[in-house]
Image (cartoon, grey):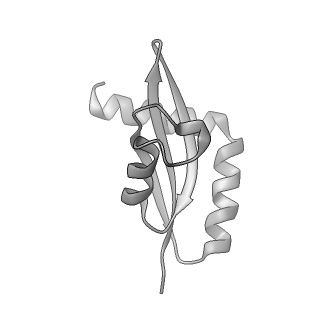
Amino acid sequence: MKKYFVYLIATKTNKKYITYVGYSADVKKRISLHNSSKGAKFTRGRRWFLVFTKKYDNRTIALQEEYKLKKNYVKRQKFLNDFLKNKNI
């Protein structure tokens, strides 16, 4: 059975962090595409790092969860802050 992942990536520009939410069956490959400017148009030209992933067994559920996370800026910021605190960035 194929697995799907919802992921949150971030980049730093001018002392502020920007986040992007997506979904993929292969997160490593997807982030590589984002970092080589072949991913989503919004992500081109920046260096992204992985902040959060969650695995789903069903594509439909993964897409629904991706949509929820895209709209929930408070949750995105919490994931980013937790990541930065744990990584001491």
User: Compared to 13, does 45 lie above or below?
Assistant: below
Residue farthest to the top, as pictured: 14
Count of numbered badges drawn on the protein = 0
User: Compared to 89, does 40 lie above or below?
Assistant: below
Q: Quadrant of residue 62?
A: bottom right
Residue depicted at 52% across the width and 63% down the height: 24
Which corner quadrant holds the C terminus? Answer: top left
* Front residue of this view, candidates 2 and 56: 2
Residue depicted at 60% across the width and 37% down the height: 42
Residue farthest to the left, as pictured: 88
The x and y percentages for residue 41 are 60, 41
The x and y percentages for residue 57 are 53, 77
* Front residue of this view, candidates 4 and 34: 34
Left or right of 6 in this view: 28: left
User: Compared to 26, does 14 lie above or below?
Assistant: above
Left or right of 63 in this view: 2: left
The x and y percentages for residue 60 are 68, 72
Q: Quadrant of residue 36?
A: top left
Residue depicted at 48% across the width and 87% down the height: 1
The x and y percentages for residue 68 are 70, 51
